[in-house]
Image (cartoon, rainbow, N blue to C red):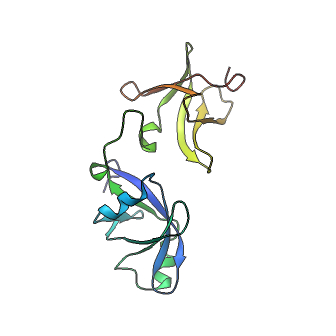
């Protein structure tokens, strides 16, 4: 199965208890939307499964159960596996909203300048989204805050993000 039509909505971070429950780090802003899906795909083999999100423990961590997983040993084998859903089941986004996967691979340009690199990944270490940018001039990788102060335009049709970065960051 191809992952082109799927989006990552979470990652299994550990087992929980002895009855096969798992802790899931959910990658959606609206966590309640997870309860509306009947089937998820789990891991590289894309095991289709119902996931019951039982209890929220922290900001994005949920305790979850899957009917096929009945004990701790089975749950332990799922640690690190990603959880996917088909993109057609996701809610529509507002004009200024984007899924991380839509930003990955876009070219980075500086306002009034040439291309500087491309988005390698979008990260969030707790204080907001960051664009991980691989620079064209072999100067490595930098992180740019994904906010209105640094990002002036996103053009998905032309696959570009135009930046007005803080002075000294890229210019």
Left or right side of 71 for 169: right
Identify whether 156 is placed above or below 31. above
Task: Tell me the residue at 39%/60% (across/down).
Answer: 32
Q: How many marks?
A: 0
Image quarter (top left, top right, bottom left or bottom right) of the C terminus: top right
Q: Tell which of 64 and 78 is nearer to you.
A: 64
Look at the image and tell me whether residue 46 can be seen. Answer: no
Q: Would residue 138 be seen by someone viewing this image from the given angle?
A: yes
Quadrant hosting residue 150: top right
Q: Position of residue 38 (x, y in %)?
A: 28, 66
Look at the picture and state if 54 lies above or below 125. below
- Which residue is drawn at the image coordinates 69% and 27% (left, top)? 169
The residue drawn where x is 54% and y is 29% is: 148
User: Where residue 41 sits: x, y (%)?
Assistant: 35, 63
Q: Is residue 12 left or right of residue 136?
A: left
Percent of width and height locating residue 40: 33, 64
**Spot occupied by residue 72 in the image (x, y as percentages of width and height):** 50, 84
Specify the quadrant of the image occupied by residue 48.
Answer: bottom left
Q: Is residue 134 left or right of residue 37?
A: right
């Amino acid at each position: 199965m191809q992952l082109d039509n799927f989006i990552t909505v979470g990652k299994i971070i550990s087992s929980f208890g002895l009855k096969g429950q798992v802790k899931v780090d959910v990658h959606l802003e609206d966590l309640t939307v997870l309860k509306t899906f009947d089937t998820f795909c789990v891991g590289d083999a894309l095991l289709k499964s119902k996931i019951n999100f039982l209890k929220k423990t922290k900001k994005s961590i949920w305790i979850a159960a899957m009917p096929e997983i009945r004990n701790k040993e089975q749950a332990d084998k799922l640690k690190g596996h990603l959880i996917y859903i088909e993109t057609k089941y996701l809610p529509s986004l507002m004009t200024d909203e984007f899924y991380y996967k839509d930003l990955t691979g876009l070219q980075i340009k500086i306002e009034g300048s040439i291309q500087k690199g491309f988005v390698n990944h979008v990260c969030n270490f707790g204080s907001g989204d960051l664009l991980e940018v691989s620079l064209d001039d072999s100067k490595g990788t930098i992180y740019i805050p994904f906010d209105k102060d640094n990002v002036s335009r996103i053009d998905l049709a032309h696959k570009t993000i135009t930046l007005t970065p803080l002075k000294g960051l890229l210019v």
